[in-house]
Image: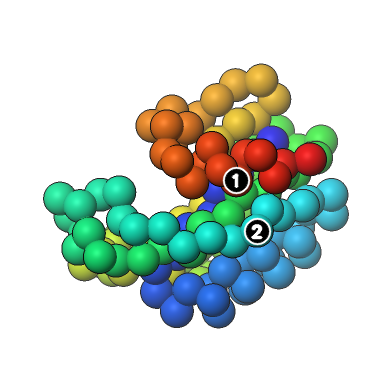
């Protein structure tokens, strides 16, 4: 499984906390480097807004239906809310990009930073 993580609010702290929480649940997880990018959703968010992004590869026996609630719980623990999202504040966003051989969030696969970070997945 490959997941993406992104944050634009207290980014260093929130990325660190997200990684720690993911490691406490998934014991076989590796992260790529974290890189800064500009917003891709410039209609809703100031195009100068910077995001800290990384990918993670997870080997797990959990089913997709068991994993999705865990990721949402981690987002919630870090304070992610619909109200803040509408203001362009993303404390943490965790998305499943690939589970088994199935790709998810297909638009994300076209983003340059995803291509760059995928080269670091082992």
Task: Report the residue at 72% width, 42% height from top.
Answer: 121
Q: Quadrant of residue 116?
A: top right
Viewer-nearest residue: 63 or 5: 5
**SS class, disc 2:** loop
Going 48% across and 73% down the picture, which residue do you hit?
Answer: 11
Above or below, comparing residue 34 to residue 60 in the picture:
below
The residue located at (61%, 66%) in the rendering is 18
Q: Which mark is residue 117?
A: 1
Residue 14's x, y, as percent? 53, 73
- Asked whether residue 47 appears in the rendered view, the answer is yes
Q: Is residue 25 above or below residue 4?
A: below
Left or right: 90, with 60 as reference point: left
Residues marked 1 and 2 touching at CB (< 8 Å): yes
Q: Position of residue 83 (x, y in %)?
A: 25, 66
What residue is shown at x 20% (from left), y 52% (from top)? 42
Give the vertical position of 5 relative to 58 (above or below): below
For marks 1 and 2, give the CA distance: 7 Å
């Amino acid at each position: 499984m490959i997941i993406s993580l992104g944050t634009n609010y207290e980014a260093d702290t929130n990325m660190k906390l997200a990684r720690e929480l993911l490691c406490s649940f998934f014991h076989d997880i590796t992260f790529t480097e974290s890189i800064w990018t500009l917003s891709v959703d410039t209609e809703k968010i100031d195009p100068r807004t910077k995001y800290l992004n990384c990918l993670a590869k997870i080997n797990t026996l959990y089913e997709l239906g068991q994993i999705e609630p865990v990721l949402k719980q981690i987002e919630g623990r870090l304070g992610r809310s619909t109200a803040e999202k509408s203001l362009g504040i993303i404390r943490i966003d965790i998305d499943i990009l690939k589970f088994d051989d199935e790709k998810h969030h297909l638009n994300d696969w076209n983003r340059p930073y995803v291509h760059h970070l995928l080269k670091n997945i082992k």
